[in-house]
Image (cartoon, rainbow, N blue to C red):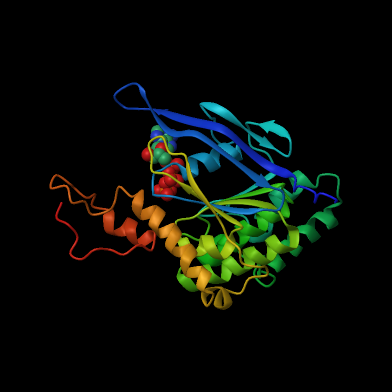
Amino acid sequence: MIASAQPKTMLEISHLWKAFPTPKGGEITIVKDFSLKLAEGEFATLIGHSGCGKSTVLSIVAGLANSTKGGIILAGRETDEPGPDRGVVFQAPCLLPWLTAFENVMIGVNQVYFTASKHERKQVAEYYLSVVGLGEAMHKYPAELSQGMRQRVGIARAFALQPKMLLLDEPFGMLDALTRFELQQVLLELWRKFRITTLMVTHDVDEAIFLSDRVVMMSDGPEAEVGDILRIPFERPRDRKVIMEDPRYYDLREHLITFLNDRSHLRPSKDPEFKPSPDMAEELRAHRLPVPTPLPAA
Ligand SMILES: Nc1ncnc2c1ncn2[C@@H]1O[C@H](COP(=O)(O)OP(=O)(O)OP(=O)(O)O)[C@@H](O)[C@H]1O
């Protein structure tokens, strides 16, 4: 019998710890012994309560922050600084306002394709901007673009680098539902085409199920760690409507929501001393969790 080839590991987050100094002196451990491996071409999402440390993990993988202990191995090499081998997309795409969408994408393209001719580099930027649906708008300035269009530029810019990994920190968090669905589709199509290993932070349970091969659930902080990992069995390419009609979808959703509820410091407590934070309802909604009415009094 011939053993099937194991997929290559693209990212290994190995026993990662992150502590921050506290205002009163000493330090607080935000992330504790966090380990995760992503196979080449895999799409994983990181989900957990606000403040548990998702962005902290992503920033360390991006090389934008240092770990206190543990390390990151990307494509077999230890890394602790940023580089064009990782395309990063944040909630807001941070475009330079005095440059057009095309010129913003060209900054990274010039850096990565420095041996290509000017004409070839221009073609690369134009190609990725067209693929994300900005063929007609690529010479507009950020102020002339909608929020969704700006985020398309951010996605084009990340893919144009042809990175080994994509790191996405709630890239659709600021968009309305329709635009978010559109951009999820754009992202999935690009990911299917280029198979770039992706780690994405999201608050949205449905988004995590629709996009991911695996959903990594982080326990509440401080000392957050990998709480559970859910494999999403749906075949690709995925169709939102077909998935939502699949009975497994509701089991997966239930699994994630139960995890978030059980680990939630936001749940209304039977404890008479319980004081919910003023942001509680907003937080529950962000996770698409039911908001109790009336909210327990603070
Ligand atoms: N530079 C810093 N100095 C001190 N504390 C920090 C720093 N950066 C983050 N923290 C703290 O670390 C914790 C985790 O923050 P992080 O942004 O990683 O959480 P998150 O899960 O991504 O939250 P959200 O979902 O709200 O974006 C928070 O309590 C935050 O206040």
- Residue 193 relative to residue 218: left or right: right
Counting from the top left corner in percent of width and height, residue 103 is at 68, 56
Counting from the top left corner in percent of width and height, residue 242 is at 58, 77
Q: Is residue 251 above or below residue 93?
A: below
- Residue 216 relative to residue 103: left or right: left
Towards the viewer: 266 or 124: 266
Within the image, what quadrant is residue 280 found in? bottom left
Towards the viewer: 263 or 187: 263
Q: Is residue 87 above or below residue 149?
A: above
Tell me what residue is drawn at x 47 percent, y 66 percent. 251
For the image, the number of numbered tags is: 0
Tell me what residue is drawn at x 52 percent, y 60 percent. 208
Which residue occupies the extreme front position in the image? 1
Q: Answer yes or no: is residue 244 visible.
A: yes
Tell me what residue is drawn at x 64 percent, y 38 percent. 12
Towards the viewer: 79 or 110: 79
Counting from the top left corner in percent of width and height, residue 64 is at 56, 37
Q: Answer yes or no: is residue 145 visible.
A: no
Tell me what residue is drawn at x 24 percent, y 63 percent. 292
* Ligand 1 occupies quarter: top left
Counting from the top left corner in percent of width and height, residue 183 is at 58, 67
- Residue 91 relative to residue 291: left or right: right
